[in-house]
Amino acid sequence: MPFPAAIGAKMGAPEREVVAVIGDGGYQMTIQELGTIFQTQTAVKIVVLNNDFLGMVRQWQQMFFEKRYASTEMVNPNFVAIAKGYHLEAKKVDKREDLDAAVAEMIASDKPYFLEICVEKEANVFPMIPAGASVSEIRLN
């Protein structure tokens, strides 16, 4: 769920657990919404999957343009420091063995929470439908 939509979902149903799972590129496009969370204390959980790329565009360049990457690699800021600047609980996970405990801590929190998870640079998202293709031509890998 996109970050701003997650905030709205939590405001609309405050008794429900709402988790926004976002790529680092998409997060950078909506990071200013941390101000909304800080101001309203909306207890949404934010999970950023950080591969240091504009992942969807990079995936297209990998799969359909012989890995000719152009303008997709990102140099990200310190996302945890930014979240803490808005007084959110925040953590970064860069080792798989630390993931379960970090997710459990996030879910146990009754406050807004930011969790950055570092993933492989070329981790892809499926299913996807190539440009101009029909749904019957969906790619699963």
Image: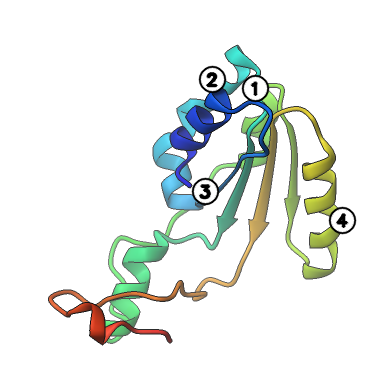
Local packing at callout 4 (Cα closer than 10 Å; few below 14, some 14-19, many 20+) is: few
Residue 86 tag number: 1
- Mark 4 sits on what residue? 101
Quadrant of the frame with the C terminus: bottom left
* Amino acid type shown at disc 1: Tyr
Quick one: SS at disc 4?
helix
Q: Which of marks 1 and 4 is nearer the N terminus?
A: 1
Which residue appears at 18% of the width and 79% of the height? 134
CB atoms at circles 3 and 1 under 8 Å apart?
Answer: no
* Amino acid type shown at disc 4: Ala
Residue 65 visible to the viewer? no
- Mark 3 sits on what residue? 76
Question: Camera-side residue: 86 or 105?
Answer: 105
Which residue appears at 59% of the width and 12% of the height? 39
Residue 35 tag number: 2
**Measured Cα–Cα span from mark 1 to mark 2:** 7 Å
**Measured Cα–Cα span from mark 3 to mark 2:** 19 Å
Q: Is residue 38 shown left or right of residue 30?
A: right
Quick one: SS at disc 2?
helix
**Measured Cα–Cα span from mark 1 to mark 4:** 23 Å
CB atoms at circles 1 and 2 under 8 Å apart?
Answer: yes
CB atoms at circles 1 and 4 under 8 Å apart?
Answer: no
* 6 relative to 141, above or below: above
